[in-house]
Amino acid sequence: MKHCPICAATAGSLAILASCGQHAITKLQITNPSISAWIQIEENMSEREALAILGPPQSIVVIEEAFTAAGGSQSSIKLLQYGSVSYQSHQLRIIYPFRLVIGGDRVLTKQDPYGGRLSISTIDYAPTLISPPAESLFTYYPSYVDLRWSLVSGPRDLEYEIEVQYGGEHGMPPYSEYNKSVVPQYTYLLPRARNIRWRVRAVARGVAGPWSEYNVMHGME
């Protein structure tokens, strides 16, 4: 793993400053409801039942007359936010909310940063690779590639391990390189290689979750 002397990794209760690819300083902030309570919320549950489980939201946004209730009457939509996972860097700033969508005094849907794949103290799910698309071709050098994947739910001190493999032509074994990030993004300088593949897994307290599928990129030799 390549260590950057400019960046440093620091963990706090709610914010983590990441050492990152090519000095792109990245900050992760987490505020979330009780995951065990959040799991209990179901669609079509009454708003009163949901509030009894989760308590008052951090914020409420009302969208007037945006929902057609039973009988054809118009009703407002309420967005109840209970926290978020967010991060920012030189490249981007993304916020994933914990949010209930209420219409006609019922839970229409709930949204969370993990796509409903929730764990509390273990790492049960593999990330889904998002970018770059599979079989992407990079015909220039140097090529700095923004690797991105989905968030993984688990312990607060969770981080991600990125494996990149390349080489392996002419009967030689492939070379594997490993890097780490506390956010679902890593800026990577592609090596001079024709075929490059990468994957990601979440790790916490020395225990690793399952690897994602490999994604293949193509570069210049």
Image: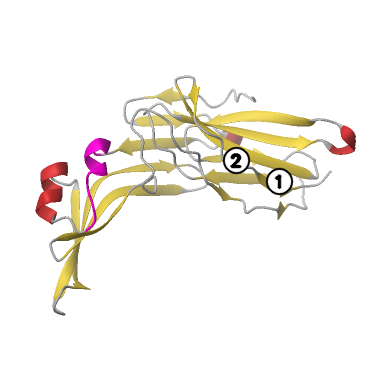
Name of the residue lying farthest toward the bottom? 72
Q: Position of residue 70 (x, y in %)?
A: 15, 74
Residue 93 appears left or right of 31: right
On the question of residue 207 being in view, the answer is: yes
The image quadrant that residue 147 belongs to is top right
Secondary structure at numbered mark 1: loop
In magenta, the rendered stretch is 33-43
Residue 21 appears left or right of 47: right
Residue 45 appears left or right of 178: left
Packing grade of label 1 (10 A; few <14, some 14-19, many >=20) is some
> Residue type at mark 2?
Thr
Which residue is label 1 attached to? 143
Residue 138 appears left or right of 60: right
> Residue type at mark 1?
Ser
In the picture, the quarter occupied by the N terminus is top right
Q: Position of residue 17 (x, y in %)?
A: 44, 30
Q: CA distance from mark 2 to mark 1?
A: 10 Å
| Between discs 2 and 1, the one toward the N terminus | 1
Name of the residue lying farthest toward the right? 170
Residue at x-position 24% and y-position 56%: 43
Q: Position of residue 14 (x, y in %)?
A: 32, 31
How many numbered marks, from 0 up?
A: 2
Which residue is label 2 attached to? 187
Query: Would you place residue 89 above or below residue 208 in this image?
Result: below
Callout 2–callout 1 Cβ contact below 8 Å: no
